[in-house]
Amino acid sequence: MVLELLKGETLEELSRKYAVTAAEINAWRDEFIQNGTDGFKRKPEDSKLSRAERKIGQLELELELVKKKNALVEKLKKK
């Protein structure tokens, strides 16, 4: 029914043909379109999360290096 609507049949024709309200058909169409577009998404939140996790790992490594460098500098100053 939704495909027929998207292919050009009128809402009124489909409503009479299948004995359902226009509101029901509209709701099904909206759900169909939303779910259809969701199926093509690569879940951007997943890729953003992966990038953020990699960046956090990189920053943790840099922080650890800075701490070691500072400790070495302090050690050398005391000598």
Image (cartoon, helix red, strand yellow):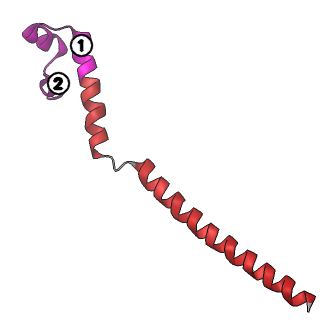
Dot 1: element: helix
Q: Quadrant of the N terminus?
A: top left
Residue appearing at x 52%, y 60% in the figure = 53
Residue wearing tag 2: 2
Q: Which mark, residue 24?
A: 1
38 or 66, which lies in front?
66
Q: Nearer the viewer, residue 65 or 22?
A: 65
Main SS category, magenta section: helix
Categorize mark 1 by other alpha carbons within 10 Å: few (<14), some (14-19), many (20+). few
The verdict on residue 16 being magenta is yes
Q: Amino acid at mark 2?
A: Val
Comes first in the chain, label 2 or label 1 = 2
Residue 68 percent location from the top left of the image: 73, 79
Looking at this view, is 2 or 66 the one in front?
A: 66
27 w.r.t. 51: above or below: above
Residue at 92% in and 87% down = 78
Q: Which residues are magenta?
A: 1-28
Residue 18: image quadrant is top left
Residue ranking furthest to the bottom? 79
Q: Residue at x 16, y 8 (%)?
A: 20
Q: Quadrant of the C terminus?
A: bottom right
Q: Is residue 18 above or below residue 34?
A: above
Separation (CA) of disc 2 from disc 1:
10 Å
**Where's residue 39, x and y in %?**
27, 42
Q: Is residue 68 magenta?
A: no
Which residue type does callout 1 highlight? Answer: Glu
Rendering coords of residue 73 (x, y %): 83, 85
Name the element at disc 2: helix
User: What's the residue at 76%, 82% (across, down)?
Assistant: 69
